[in-house]
Image (cartoon, rainbow, N blue to C red):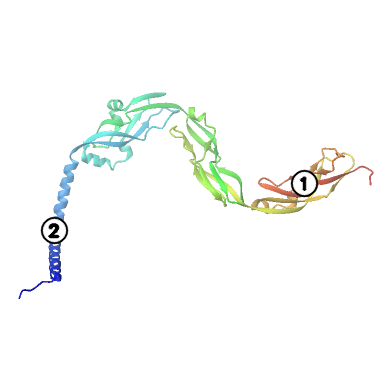
Amino acid sequence: MPVICKPFCYINMAEKKIQLNMEQVSDFFHNLFVKNFRTKLIVLLITIIIWSYTMLRNEYTTKMNIPFEIINIQEGKVLKQNLPKNVKARFQGDGLDFFFLLFQSRNSFRLVLDLSTIKWFYDFDLNNYYDRHPENVILPRNSNVQLINIVRPESLSVELDDLEQKKIPVRSQIITSLEPGYTKYELNIEPDSVLIKGPKSYLDEIRYINTRKMVKNEVSSPININIELQDFGDKNITVEPEKVQVMQMVDQIVEKVISGIPVEILNPPPEGDIETQPAKITLYISGGFSKIKNIESDDISASIDLEGDVKTEKQFYQPEINGLGNNIEINRIEPAEIRLRYIEQGEG
């Protein structure tokens, strides 16, 4: 009687076939990577070394960014513009020499431009210059790399100016908005002036230097920031120091009532007496807590200046308040006006 294989029989056969294939693949990779692993690793390393040596001994032509240096500027002169710190040039040499250059310092591999013969300005064709002055192509010892040509920039316009220095004030460009209920006091910059050095034609036009721009919103605590000064771009101007400290006190606004402030009469008429009604006033002020907290009536003066005469038609005068200092506001004076009564001599 024939055996009828149900569907699950075919599934089992397929699973066994897949399992067999996976075992074969596993054996293949095991033999490839694990069996005789040390021997294969040594062969691989030798192959890499031989390949690397062959590649490094080949001749190559490549473009490189090489440090660029200006030397021998005449005493008392300065470059009017900053020149590039690197020049792109095409070099030729074998791979080993180029590999060696990767580990050299800036001083051992650079292009030099000698300005000892330049008084004011000169246009340099760099390719012609280095053809005529190969000694200014500084390469490490035992290096066989050769300069083929300058790629960028091919020419340079060099302009000199008299070197000058001067001190200029610093202006803050820090913009602050306060949280409601706070006030700020005078801003301080330390140092408040800096030394700039550079071409005379530029420095003659500079009157001050700004800090970098900064915006601070909803400020409720004192400001104390070290901030950089503005950059003069390519004008070859140096600034000492490059940073300043900007400080500004921020304080909470409070109110205070000061009573019992005597009213003083200044320059009374030579004859007679002046009677003030009332003789003392009360002051309502507001400002930063640290400024207001220690103010007492003895610190404030209230006065009326009669300038040596009494106007009989005028009876009420507004006192002048002194001694509060900056950043303090007078909200109210009680009474707002003082009545003066002139008493002639002999009048009882």
Residue holding disc 2: 32
Q: Are marks 1 and 2 in contact (CB under 8 Å)?
A: no
- Picture coordinates of residue 71 (x, y %)? 37, 31
Q: Earlier in the sequence, mark 1 or mark 2?
A: 2
Tell me if residue 261 comes above or below residue 36 in the rendering: above
What secondary structure is marked by label 2? helix
Residue bearing mark 1: 302
Question: Residue 310: horizontal and vertical position, in percent?
Answer: 86, 39
Identify the image quadrant of residue 321: top right
Answer with left or right where residue 10 lies relative to residue 167.
Answer: left
Is residue 250 or residue 145 the one in the foreground? 250
| Numbered circle sitting on residue 135 | none
Residue 87 placement, left or right of 234: left
Q: Residue furthest bottom?
A: 1
Residue nearest the observer in this picture, 8 or 111: 8
Q: Amino acid at mark 1?
A: Ala
The residue sitting at 17% across, 44% down in the picture is 53
Q: In which quarter of the view is residue 157 placed?
A: top left
Amino acid marked by disc 2: Leu
